[in-house]
Amino acid sequence: MVKRYGCYLTTRVIELNICETYLSRIAFYAAKDNEACGEKEKKTILLKMGEVMKINHINLTVNDVTASRDFLETYFGLTCAGSRGDGFAAMRDDDGSILTLMKGSNVQYPKTFHVGFIQENEEQVNRINQRLKEDGFKVKPPQHIHRYTFYVEAPGGFKVEVLC
């Protein structure tokens, strides 16, 4: 149980699309399913958390921080904002989003887990695809699926989607 604003919320796994993650929605849905929270407490949670929150960072556990860092710098323009040896790196994009990399062993993400990098147009997607292919990465040509997209296995044990 996690105590928030005088109301106990049941801790549970919620599958979210990161693009639509607002803490007020998380608080509402968690409170909505908890019988210990009355209507008054639910409204209090929504009022106190009514502001849209921006994600500060996401942490990835990777089996090779240096290789993951180099990959993200080389192909996606992230810059290293700080690091500690070969066990940690904080990567930043031009918008200030942070992706931290922490060393782990036996890294195994679920099959559908990935980090997405959106591009402005198909030409940029094609250019990144070609560059990865030329550098020895196994990538299929981009396809029109849910967007114009392709996936690549990144060094470190995680998948990256490039799309527009």
Image: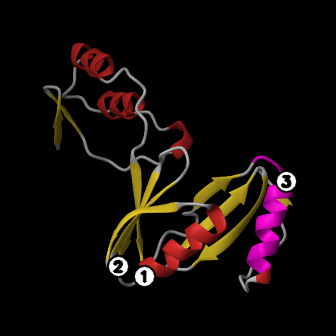
At 32% from the left and 79% from the top, the residue drawn is 85
Residue beneath label 1, please? 63
Give me the C-alpha separation between circle 1 and circle 3.
31 Å
Q: Position of residue 131 (x, y in %)?
A: 78, 74
The answer to which quarter of the image holds residue 39 is: top left
Q: Nearer the viewer, residue 10 or 108?
A: 108
Residue beneath label 3, please? 122
Q: Position of residue 30 (x, y in %)?
A: 33, 35
The answer to which quarter of the image holds residue 72 is: bottom right
- Colour logic: secondary structure
Quick one: label 2 or label 1, which is nearer the N terminus?
1
Q: Position of residue 89 (x, y in %)?
A: 38, 68
Quick one: label 3 or label 2, which is nearer the N terminus?
2
Q: Is residue 126 magenta?
A: yes
- Badge 2 vs badge 1, beta-carbon distance below 8 Å: yes
Q: Say which element carries label 2.
A: loop
Give me the C-alpha separation between circle 3 and circle 2.
35 Å
Label 1 is placed on what type of residue?
Answer: Asn
Q: Position of residue 45 (x, y in %)?
A: 27, 22
Residue beneath label 2, please? 104
Q: Nearer the viewer, residue 35 or 103?
A: 103
Q: Say which element carries label 3.
A: helix
At 29% from the left and 15% from the top, the residue drawn is 43
Magenta region, residue range? 120-133
Quarter occupied by the N terminus? top left
At 26% from the left and 45% from the top, the residue drawn is 11
In the picture shown, does residue 44 fall above or below 18?
above
Q: Count residues near mark 2 (Cα–Cα under 10 Å), then give few for <14, some for 14-19, many for 20+.
A: some
